[in-house]
Image (spheres, rainbow, N blue to C red):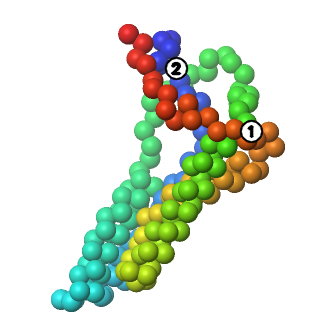
Amino acid sequence: MAPGNAQTPRTNPGVAVVIRAAAIGSGALLIGVAFVAAFGVADTRQGLVAEVVTLLSGLTGTGLLIYGLVPSWTSGARHDSGRSAAPPKASPRTANDLVIGVPGLLLVGVLLTGLAISGGWLWASLGGLLLLPMGIGSAYLVAAFTRDQDRMWRIDLRRFTRRRRNPS
């Protein structure tokens, strides 16, 4: 097999089920926010804000529901190459996780605070639902770093700036 066509290791099927269930739950919640906001639509400034919240949360909720309910595409049949089924050993976590995770959590907090102060609870709830994946991802990076026994307190910026070369 060509080097660029190597198969990536498959993730745990249980994780995919949790992600899909979270997408379905978040989508249903966003559609619920859209229905609640629809009752506030009027020919006023707050009514126009409610209309925007209705449209955006309905669109995002529908997208999440579709993602959660439609089965994923597979890239062909699974082949057993005769290798052992033992998962590869994960490399130790570096402080890169903190470099990305902590500012992500701070950004979520600042954005939600700004939305709550300037836009009210309706905008803050929509913003919270839309920023939920970012907050979860940032919290995961921080938690994974703190829980890893072999963590390394070094920041390697080359992983972020390295360009990939095309083998031609």
Mark seen at residue 28: none
| Relative side of 10 to 61, left or right | right
Question: SS for tag 2?
Answer: loop
Number of on-image labels: 2
Three-letter residue code for mark 2: Ala
Q: Please state the horizontal and vertical placement of residue 155, each as a whole percent of the image.
A: 64, 39
Q: Residue at x 42, y 38 (%)?
A: 73
Q: Residue at x 51, y 57 (%)?
A: 134
Q: Please state the horizontal and vertical placement of residue 95, each as a whole percent of the image.
A: 67, 43
Three-letter residue code for mark 1: Met
Q: Residue at x 44, y 74 (%)?
A: 114
Residue linked to disc 2: 6
User: Is residue 122 shown above or below 16?
Assistant: below
- For discs 2 and 1, the disc positioned in front in the rendered view: 1
Nearer to me, 19 or 123: 123
User: Is residue 158 shown above or below 121?
Assistant: above
Nearer to me, 161 or 56: 161
Which tag, 2 or 1, sits closer to the chain's start? 2
Residue 12: tell me if it is visible.
Answer: no
Nearer to me, 65 or 111: 111
Q: Quadrant of the C terminus?
A: top left
* Real-space Cα separation, disc 2 to disc 1, in angstroms: 29 Å
Residue 54: tell me if it is visible.
Answer: yes
| Relative side of 39 to 128, left or right | left
Q: Please state the horizontal and vertical placement of residue 154, each as a whole percent of the image.
A: 69, 38
Question: SS for tag 1?
Answer: loop
Mark seen at residue 152: 1
